[in-house]
Amino acid sequence: LGSVQGGLDYRFAHALARQAVLDVIPPLRRARLHARAGEALEARSAEGLTGTQQLAHHFSHALGDEMSVKARHYLVRAGALTERALAHEEAAQYFQQAAEMADDPVERHEALLLAVPCLVSAGRFTTAMELSRLVATETADPTARLAAATAHERAGRRFGETSSAALLTDALRDYGTDHDDPAYVRALASLGRAIGFVGLTDDAVELSDSTLARARELGDDELLAHVLDAGLWHGLSPER
């Protein structure tokens, strides 16, 4: 062991030495040590990406309901900070690990939906489509289902994925009509792009124009960007 910057923190001189020690520690004792390490770091108010990653690591290897709750909290936080640092695939792994540790289906689906845009940014489109479809078909929450169907369309648009239209249609029916709700307008714009891929160009253009007008009325820049992006696929004629 060597001290870090002359303080009271220590680290192994080599990863092999660290692994050799871990291999001889019984699993239950190792889990207790992870819990103690996590609590010690937490007491020092470890902040930033590195500190949050360490907290997520230790609590996810500890045992007990309280440790599991802390693990999910820090895994999601680590995912958000990692995504902010543009490490998209690593961020998705944190969110997926949080989902795996969740006993509550709602928490599991929330974490999976956080992973989907990270996977899209990382170019993992097939995995993003699989996870979003899983949430869309499993969840009983209309809001989560609509979000998942919208995410599925975004992930599959590069392949002209046609199944997104059915997912969005079913999700919109269960969600109900609310033209003042950005999530509803966003899903409609995505549906326009999805049906455009199956040849319903006129219907796609109509949805694009109506959602574009509504996004401008709502004054939501993020929504407007989404609607404009979805509408760029329609027509491609000079006037549009």
Image: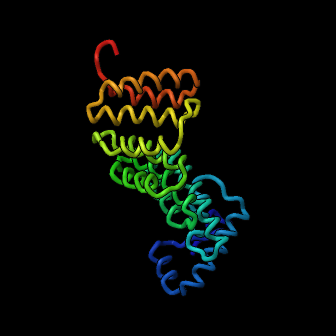
Q: Is residue 203 above or below residue 44?
A: above
> Whole-percent x and y of residue 45?
71, 59
As rendered, which of 64 and 59 lies closer to the eye? 64
Q: Residue at x 54, y 67 (%)?
A: 101
9 relative to 86 in the view: left or right:
right
As drawn, 22 above or below 109: below
Tell me which residue sits at (56%, 67%) in the image.
103
Quadrant hosting residue 53: bottom right
Q: Position of residue 83 (x, y in %)?
A: 50, 48
Colouring rule applied to residues: rainbow
Q: Position of residue 175 (x, y in %)?
A: 53, 43
Q: Is residue 219 above or below residue 52?
A: above
Q: Residue furthest right?
A: 43
x and y, in percent, of residue 177 in the image: 53, 35
The C terminus appears in which quarter of the rendering?
top left
The foreground one among 47 and 237 is 237
- The count of marks equals 0
Question: Residue placed farthest to the left in the image?
Answer: 199
Left or right side of 124 for 57: right
Q: Which residue is at 50% across, 76% downward?
A: 18
Q: In the image shown, does 187 or 222 lie closer to the viewer?
A: 187
In the displayed orientation, state which residue is furthest to the top.
Answer: 239
Quarter containing the N terminus: bottom right
